[in-house]
Amino acid sequence: MATSPEICVFGAGSIGCYVGGRLAANGATVRFIGRERVVREVREHGLRLTDLHGADQRVPAAQVDIDTAPTALDTADLVLVTVKSAATEEAGRTLASRLKPGASVVSFQNGLHNAQVLRDLLPGRTVLAGTVLFNVAAQGQGAFHAGSEGTLDIEQHAVLAPFVDAFARAGLPLKQHADFGAVMWAKLLFNLNNAINALADLPLKEELSRRAWRRCVALAQREALAVLDVARVKPAKFTPLPPHWIPGLLEMPDAVFAVLAKKMLAIDPKARSSMWDDLKAGRKTEVDYLNGEVVRLGQKHGVAVPVNSRIVELVHEAEAGPRRAWTGEALLAELQRAKSSTGA
C-alpha cells in the first residue's frame, strides 16, 4: 500500500461530505463520488465542515476531487459507502466491477444489513459495518454541520490500521468493536426518532424539548426493546443510561428531561434528522430500514409492533404528500390508538 493510502467516499451526501471533508481538511487523500447536484455545489463552493463545539474547517473547491463517475473506486484503498440504504445493491455492483485487489469497504449507513448486502456482492473482500453516531445537516453552498455529539463506530479489523491515524487527525477517531450487532441495534433505537422528527417538522432540539414528541419516541423504543428481549438481542450502551432506561427518561416532564439529557447528549439548534431532510426534498426516506426493521423482527418472532408499523405508514403517507402538519399531542394520540387497537 502507498505511504498515503487513498480513501474514496461513495455517496457524497451529508454524512459522506462531512466525514470525507474532515479527513481531507486534515491531510488525507480523499476522492468523492456523488450525485450531480452535490458535485456542482462542491465544485463551486468547496467544503466547509462545522460542528456544535465550534470547529470550522474548509477545503477549497480546487482541492476537492469529486465527480459523478465512479472512477475514484479504481485506485481507492478504502471505500466509505455512505449512500442511502435503498441504493446499497447498486453500489455493491459498481464496487464489484471496479475495486482493485486488496481494497476494503466500510458501510457507514443507517440500518442493520447494508454491510451484509455488500459482502454478498463482494465475495472475498473485507467489508466492515460502521455507524455514524452524530447528526449532520447540509447547510447549502458546500457547508455541512455536525449538530450533535457522537462517534464513528466500526467493526474491529486489522485492515483499519493504515487509516486509524487519518481519522484521529480529523477529529473523528474510529471506535472499534468486536460485537458490532449490539452496536447497530443501539444505533437503530436512537434512529427511531428520525421518523418522529420528520413528522414533527422541527429541529431535533426543539422536538426533543417537548414531552409529547418524546413520548412518541418512547412508545417506538419500548416496542422495539420488547421485541429485542424476545429475540435475545442486547443492544450496546451508548449513554450513561442503559438502553431500557431511555424511554423512561424521554417520558419525564420537560424541566427534568432538560437537566438530565444535557448530561447525556449535546444537540445544537441546527440539527435535524436525515429523514426530515429527505421529506423536505421529496425523496424516499429510509423508514423501512429503521422502524421497518422493528416491524420485520416483530413479525419473525410473533410480537405485535403496532406503533412502529403505524409510524412506517405515516412516513410513507408523507412521502406521497401532501404532508400533514402534526402536533406532538395528535401524533401521540394516533400512536396510542394503534397500540390499543391490538391490545399490545
Image (spheres, grey):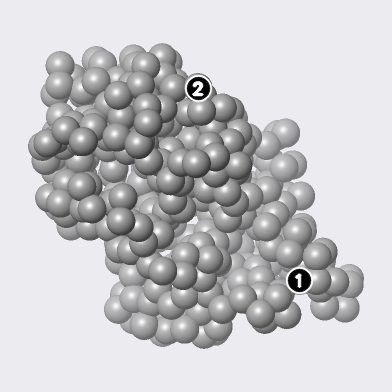
Q: Which residue matches tag 1?
A: 336
- Foreground of the two, 214 or 189: 189
Q: Amino acid at mark 2?
A: Ser
Quadrant of the drawing holding the N terminus? top left
Q: Amino acid at mark 1?
A: Gln
- Foreground of the two, 210 or 317: 317
The answer to whether 123 is drawn above or below residue 213 in the figure is: above
Residue appearing at x 20%, y 47% in the figure: 162
Q: CB of mark 1 within 8 Å of CB of mark 2?
A: no
The answer to whether 322 is drawn above or below residue 113 in the figure is: above
Q: Is residue 296 left or right of residue 201?
A: right
Rendering quarter of residue 149: bottom left
Look at the image and tell me whether residue 76 can be seen: yes
Look at the image and tell me whether residue 274 can be seen: no
Rendering quarter of residue 56: top left
Could you tell me which secondary element the residue under label 1 belongs to?
A: helix
- Could you say which disc has been placed on residue 97 in the image? 2
Could you tell me residue 214's position as x and y percent? Answer: 54, 70
Could you tell me residue 173's position as x and y percent? Answer: 22, 57
The answer to whether 256 is drawn above or below residue 329 in the figure is: below
Quadrant of the drawing holding the C terminus? bottom right
Residue appearing at x 51%, y 79% in the figure: 243
Could you tell me residue 91's position as x and y percent? Answer: 52, 30
